[in-house]
Image (cartoon, helix red, strand yellow):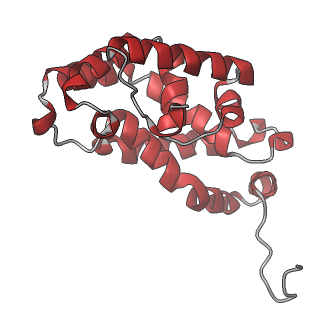
Amino acid sequence: MPAPPDAPVVPDDATLIEQSWRRPESFAMLYDRYFGEIHRYVAGRLGTQIADDLAAETFLVAFRKRHTFDPAQGSVRPWLYGIATNLLAQHRREETRRLAAFQRTPAAEAADDGHEDRVAARISAASAQGRLAAALRRLSDGDRDVLLLVALADLNYEEVAQTLGIPVGTVGSRLNRVRRKLRRALGGVNPLIGGFDG
């Protein structure tokens, strides 16, 4: 059904990027469109205190690099997640420290709204919390990025592949490998992490 003639035309992502080359203020629509989900992803990885700054930095980097965006990709969503993931890599030591602290914290005392609490809430046995944190900390950076882009950002395999610049098949194989590692670390318990389990 066609839109009414007086309905405003909402430009797609690629069009907004192109418009922002001439009119930088057009980029604000992309900020409004995607800031919330990028913020949630960063908050899930590093906690809410740093999420405001890192999510804002993601859009600052994207704005500065907007001429490098390939319009053939269509949506800027995977591109933004790629930028956010690269910025997160700079903060990996903090993430590792948080996971180590989480491992030492009994499940009943966990109070942070970070990634660890959401994972803990979704596992079938609260006693597995420390083992899960240790297993997450032992994952390679690439495996952890794939897992958390699926579990926290709710990206599909194609979007994860675009975000990380890897083939879709690699996304699937990494998730399978992570699933096996986490199940083994949890003594066969199914971790039930969002869309990750299957």
Left or right of 105: which side holds 172? right
Q: Is residue 8 visible?
A: yes
Above or below, 170 relative to 157: above
Residue sticking out furthest to the front: 188
Front-most of residues 169 and 12 = 169
Rendered-image quadrant of the C terminus: top right
Front-most of residues 60 and 163 = 163
Q: Name the quadrant containing residue 182.
A: top left
Left or right of 192: which side holds 155? right
Q: Name the quadrant containing residue 139.
A: top left
Residue 111 position, x and y percent, is 16, 42
Above or below, 172 relative to 32: above
Q: How many marks?
A: 0
Residue 94 position, x and y percent, is 30, 23
Rendered-image quadrant of the N terminus: bottom right
Front-most of residues 178 and 65 = 178
Q: Is residue 56 visible?
A: no
